[in-house]
Amino acid sequence: MEQQSEQQAQGATGPEVELMKEYASATVLSTAANFIIERGEAFTHTYRTYVRVREQGELELRFWFSNAVDSTWDKGAVAKGSQPGGDWLIEAAYVADGGTAKDGGVAPGTQVPVTFDGNSTRLVRPGERFWSDPVKIDLPSGHDLAFTWTIASGSGRSVPYNTEQMLVTAYDAPGKHADEESGDTFSLSENKLVMPAWIGYKKTVSRRMVFFGDSITQGVRTRKDGYDYWVARIADGLGTDYGVWNIGSGWARAYDAATNGPWLHKAKQGDQVLIALGVNDIDIGERTAEQLLGDLTEIISILKRHNLAVDIILFTVPPFNFTAEREKVWRTVNDVIRNSPPAGVSRVFDIASVLSVPAPEEHRIRPEFMSPGNDPHPNGLAGKAVAEAFLSWYK
């Protein structure tokens, strides 16, 4: 159980929080880790990712790393929530002007090294959290930030990462290629986003918002590089005076968070936490209504013990075309959230009412909001509808 100090009771403090007061989340892309690299032999590999940042121009960036799996993937055969990563080495890391082409290369002459306590390499230990040094870059309007790094590890489990449909364009290549401007040695990445846990830029914001959910929060099934999922659209609507950190994670469930591990640690860095969990608890987790509500209550209790001043917004569970017993659980949980949410919740946003077909079929998502292949993950049109409803409600 987390120990509560007088300092914590008055508000969240500490080096991570203090730095995140100086730096705001630079992107709405979630880089939450739900999988882990596991290989039978040693490897060296380079990853290059193109990210739309919330502001361009002269930026001071800083990167934060968490060497742990945040949430369970599928049934946990490979990766479970709070599982520490292994030992691995950052051999080199760079930021650059990624331009607009997303072709594997970067703008010539724009690569800037990312260092760690003045060093270009960093040995990473299991479960470790750490920061990069500040790095400055001038990014032209409308251009992507390119982050490139080379990672080396021995055999076994090593680097946590996010596996899902790619929401941004990324490339990778075997070997050490982080310093290369050309994309000739790289191939398009598939279902493998290997990134720092947080990208920050030096900026004071009026509110640090953390969107804490599963693949629906992450934006899975929306267009690659489209940023048309609802968290991205909400961020655009609020403007850059609001810091928005998306830690949505595919397959995630509330009972992952209720263990008070690395994933919930990220949520603690916000002064407003927006919780949108429950679909996977009901589905693959097969939790009862009582279990799910108990996990949500525990999450909120931990956040409040950490920082009494934190503002918590709880979302209803989105419709996911549940049937039979799962539909009953979905209805019970949402009835409780709407009418008697757990203590500590400031307000409830009814995302289900935005996405659902009319009663009595409200457990089903509106057909026009479904992703291709009758997938109940909300598409970009749904993201627009949710964002518009949220912004009207929030303001």
Image (cartoon, rainbow, N blue to C red):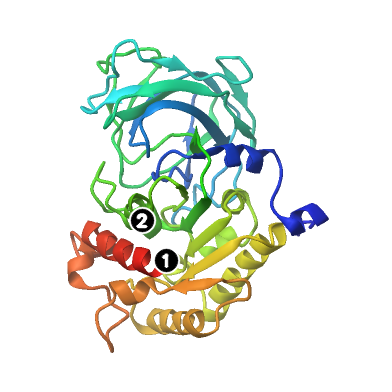
Q: On the image, numbered disc 1 is attached to which residue? A: 394
Compared with 393, 119 (above or below) is above
Task: Give the label on residue 234, or none.
Answer: 2
Name the residue rendered at 29%, 47% in the picture.
227
Image quadrant where one finds the N terminus: bottom right
Disc 1 marks a residue whose amino acid type is Tyr
Q: Return the x and y of residue 30 as percentages of the image width and height.
A: 42, 46
Viewer-nearest residue: 233 or 279 = 233
Q: Secondary structure at mark 2?
A: helix
Marks 2/1 in contact by CB < 8 Å: the verdict is yes
Q: Is residue 90 left or right of residue 279?
A: right
Q: Residues within 10 Å of mark 1 (few under 14, many from 20)?
A: few
* Distance between mark 2 and mark 1 Cα atoms: 10 Å
Q: Secondary structure at mark 1?
A: helix
Name the residue rendered at 50%, 53% in the picture.
209
Image quadrant where one finds the C terminus: bottom left
Compared with 380, 127 (above or below) is above
Counting every numbered tag in the picture gives: 2
Compared with 18, 7 (above or below) is below
Q: Return the x and y of residue 326 as percentages of the image width and height.
A: 40, 79
Name the residue rendered at 37%, 38% in the picture.
192
